[in-house]
Image: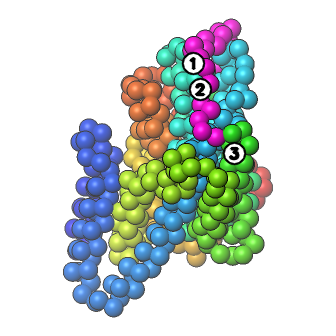
Amino acid sequence: MLTLLVVVFVLAYAAIALEHPLQVNKTATALLAAGVLWTVYALGLGDPQALGEQLGESLMSTAQIVLFLMGAMAIVEVVDAHNGFEVLTSRIKTTQLASLMWLVGLVTFFLSSILDNLTTTIVMVSLMRKLLDKREDRLFFAGIIIIAANAGGAWSPIGDVTTTMLWIGGQITSLAIMKGVFLPALVSLVVPLAVITLGLRGKVVVAPAKSGDEGQGQTTAFERQLMFFLGLGILVAVPLFKTWTHLPPFMGILLGLGVLWLVGDLVHRHKDEDAKAPLTLVHALTRIDMSSILFFVGILLAVATLEHTHILTGVASWLDATVGRQDLIVMIIGLVSAIVDNVPLVAASMGMYSLTQYPPDSFLWEFMAYCAGTGGSILIIGSAAGVAAMGMEKIDFMWYVKKVSGWALLGYLAGAFVYIAQYQLTH
């Protein structure tokens, strides 16, 4: 049974990594893998009661992550429907390309820590289309946006799916991850940003022709600002809610979603149905990327079977015996996340190492959050942010490898060394 489980999981993993060449959606692969793995495990276990308890336990931990993500995505969609992000993007004004890239990189870095790296990438790449006319300029900016979004998501419990998984799983706490990973994450952005902007010195921004009242939509300035600050305030308040009430984060996000829904209905209560419909939370729920949600469900349930059969514990023991050094093991996991999706990597790591052996906020978990979050920037297919930018700007894989990957790797290694040095100094 164990051999069959490993073979099925490896094949599924390979199919997820080769999603684009195979032209098979990774969500289909993840759901199929979860179904087959649990079927094989059920037939091999032969104990319905134990099976039900284990499946219930895995489903509960998976549901917490999924409900949190759905709530966060819905809030972002509501803000976007109100053109709320214009509150931020309309304030970016500069004529020098190098200055603009630094501004965009830092805004993306901090915005990603509040929203998530995927949403931030979509917002910032869309903004670049309004600010830059030359495609070559936009490609370099897209590269920096990918690096900045992944770096910004790594140090915040709500900025990246993998960091959120570690936070909800109890491996990290909000304040500790922000204090421990902020500086390394910033270094992983500043190093490639400094190098790439050297080649842009002296170049001016060439803006596209504007088409009048672009982006104003059906909302007033008050409505845009209200939804922007309320939406971001709810997302920022979730970690505080968890600390104060000790309730899981998905309860905080659901409470915030209810508040946003109520405020939206009150603000738009006097509008006719046609004008109100696109601005409601009901409409926002239809715009959630359910494919991504189902991918998380499938991959987390698939990894759970390896956890229950203690296969992941065995892999951890093998890595410890073969590589030996914990920092090297985590850095290897981060490099692998440039090739394959970091969600199953982190899910597998959470099953490999126990909280008894490695308590919350230990070196392993914090360094895992950094490496898995920033390692995906090395290749454009290594993160959701990269894949989104690739699709939006039609970025060629090999162009990214030649122009951005080397600097992203340099930033990743620089940040890793900063984290290790910082940890040794503070512990």
Residue 110 rendering spot, x and y as whole percentages: 69, 42
Residue 43 picture quarter: bottom left
Q: Which mark is residue 223?
A: 3
Residue 241 picture quarter: bottom right
Q: Which residue is mark 2?
A: 214
Residues packed near mark 3 inside 10 Å, few (<14), some (14 to 19) or many (20 plus): some
Along the viewing direction, whichever of 68 and 43 lies nearer the viewer: 68
Residues packed near mark 2 inside 10 Å, few (<14), some (14 to 19) or many (20 plus): few
Residue type (three-letter) at the residue carrying disc 2: Glu
Q: Earlier in the sequence, mark 3 or mark 2?
A: 2
Q: Is residue 419 left or right of residue 71?
A: right
Q: Secondary structure at mark 1?
A: loop
Residue 215 rendering spot, x and y as whole percentages: 59, 31
Q: Which stretch appears magenta?
A: 197-219
Spatial separation of the CA atoms under disc 1 and disc 2 = 6 Å
Residue found at the far right of this picture = 426
Q: Which mark is residue 374?
A: none
Q: Is residue 61 left or right of residue 131?
A: left
